[in-house]
Amino acid sequence: MASTPRYVRNAALPTILPKYPGNKMIGRQYCNGEELYEPDFGTVIKWQLSKNPQKEEKKADTWAPAVVDCSAFLAGAEEGLVWLGHASFLLRVAGRTLLFDPVLFSSFGLRRRHPLPCPPEALTGIDYLLLSHGHRDHLDEQSVKLVARRNPQLLALGPLSLGGLLQGMAPTLRVQEAGWWQQFDLGPEASFELFYLPASHWHRRGLTDMNHVLWGSFLLRRPDGRTFYFAGDTALGGHFEQIEKHFGPLDVVLMPIGAYKPAYMMQLSHVNPHEAAKAANILRAGHVVPMHYGTFDLSDEPASEPLRELEMVAHGGMLRGELHAPAVGEVLPWQDWE
């Protein structure tokens, strides 16, 4: 007998979308909106047995993003954003430091194509660890353990059911979970608001935990109304219109652009560069920072293709906002976006 659907949220946190019932679950699985989405294992087999039409082009493409040292930023108090590679970012804003989806080391199946712009041990003074979802290229156990050890004051913020996963990695780590359209509790002295918002994706780390942890995106809003949005991992979906309706136009948007080929396997998990531009335009983004490319080999497209495609879109006048594609470790000062 099929499980009866139910809707869940963190009852201790406010839900900001009127009449939103919470995240739908069927059994132990979170739904992707209203639908239960499970990637087809047969599609993975098809991918493994099929020839990549860009195989030779990909092999010859040795591009990797430039890397600059960010030690001075880490040691200072300057506000700004630093890309650490893939979907890992360091953001300092309003006197607080936030670390997004840190994957600081190579691991089985995830070999970094470029170095980190700082020693991992230098990531100290972090107030908030933001984890969009549980996939291993966004939530790395070794990285979580190191960051938790080096930052005992840290508060981890992420989706429903993440706590159990994190407690197995770092038992003393404080964790606050949120469902979609919920606002995190950062305390009475908080210098900004932080919200957990939808994404079109899924979860799996092992053989028996399909969709047992929610996935999503983050939006930070300063007291003056300026916004900063981290899209997480996502396919193109109606959630972008919903987010724009509630928060738009957005000031700064971090948008994934890589791991989109072959489309028959990736299109329900990731946006391609043209879809990323469309999503940013829907959000009415003033500034767009691409991510989720250049660091790990996850799919069939050549390494340099995602950024080249997005730059072509921008140069053709089809990207509403200003494109910023920093080197790894380069500081993007917040005041440049005012």
Image (cartoon, rainbow, N blue to C red):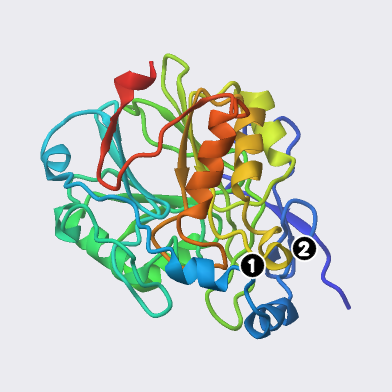
- Judge by depth and name the residue closer to the eye, 151 or 261: 261
Circle 1: is it few (<14), some (14-19), or many (20+) Cα within 10 Å?
many
Dot placed on the residue nearer the N-terminal end, 2 or 1: 2
The N terminus - image quarter:
bottom right
Q: Is 129 above or below relative to 57?
A: above
Q: Quadrant of residue 149?
A: bottom left
Residue 256 visible in the current orientation: no
Kind of residue at disc 2: Leu
Q: Is residue 19 above or below residue 292?
A: above
Q: Is residue 285 left or right of residue 267?
A: left
The disc label shown at residue 36, or none? 2
Residue shown at 18%/53% (left/top)?
Answer: 118
- Quadrant position of residue 47: bottom right
Q: Is residue 234 above or below residue 26?
A: above
Identity, as a three-letter code, of the amino acid under mark 1: Asn
How many angstroms separate mark 2 from mark 1 (CA)?
9 Å
Secondary structure beneath dot 2 equals loop
The spot of residue 177 in percent (x, y) is: 50, 51
The percent coordinates of residue 333 (x first, y second) are 28, 27
- The C terminus lies in which quarter of the figure? top left
Q: From the viewer's perspective, tell me whether residue 51 is left or right of residue 139.
A: right
Which residue is identified by label 1?
A: 211
